[in-house]
């Protein structure tokens, strides 16, 4: 039973990693970055959010907290600058 759970966990981790590797590649695509920039979205921050979500889904909560907290701080700062006309 423990081996089955371990095997299932490894399979799920592999699926999660594959999904987020695809997303990472997409976010690094020049066309996607152009559209994201036009929407006011920073691709580097989007990748950090994706990394944080990947960590959370893998049970790596400390890493998730760090990545997502940094992303929230950056998004908030950029939003406030944009509201002031500084961004």
Image (cartoon, rainbow, N blue to C red):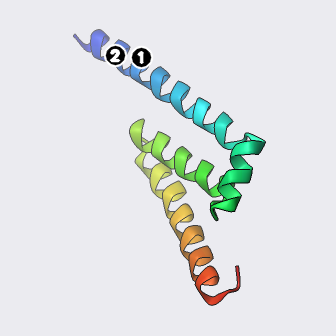
The residue nearer to you, when weighing 4 against 57, is 57
The residue nearer to you, when weighing 77 against 29, is 29
Q: Is residue 3 left or right of residue 58?
A: left
Q: Are marks 1 and 2 in contact (CB under 8 Å)?
A: yes
Quadrant hosting residue 21: top right
Percent position (x, y) of residue 31? 74, 43
- Residue that lies at the very extreme toward the bottom in this rendered image: 84
**Where is mark 2, residue-wise?**
8
Percent position (x, y) of residue 4? 29, 10
- Give the spatial CA distance, label 1 vs label 2: 5 Å
- Residue that lies at the very extreme toward the left in this rendered image: 1
- The C terminus, quarter of image: bottom right
Figure check: 29 above or below 87: above
What residue lies at 61% left-to-right and 48% top-to-bottom? 47
**Where is mark 1, residue-wise?**
11
Figure check: 31 above or below 36: above
Figure check: 41 above or below 80: above
């Amino acid at each position: 039973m423990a081996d089955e759970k371990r095997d299932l966990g490894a399979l799920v981790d592999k699926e999660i990693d594959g999904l987020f590797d695809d997303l990472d590649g997409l976010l690094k695509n020049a066309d996607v970055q152009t559209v994201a920039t036009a929407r006011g979205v920073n691709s580097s921050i989007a990748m950090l959010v994706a990394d944080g979500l990947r960590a959370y889904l893998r049970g790596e909560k400390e890493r998730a907290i760090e990545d997502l907290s940094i992303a929230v701080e950056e998004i908030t700062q950029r939003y406030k600058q944009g509201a002031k006309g500084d961004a």
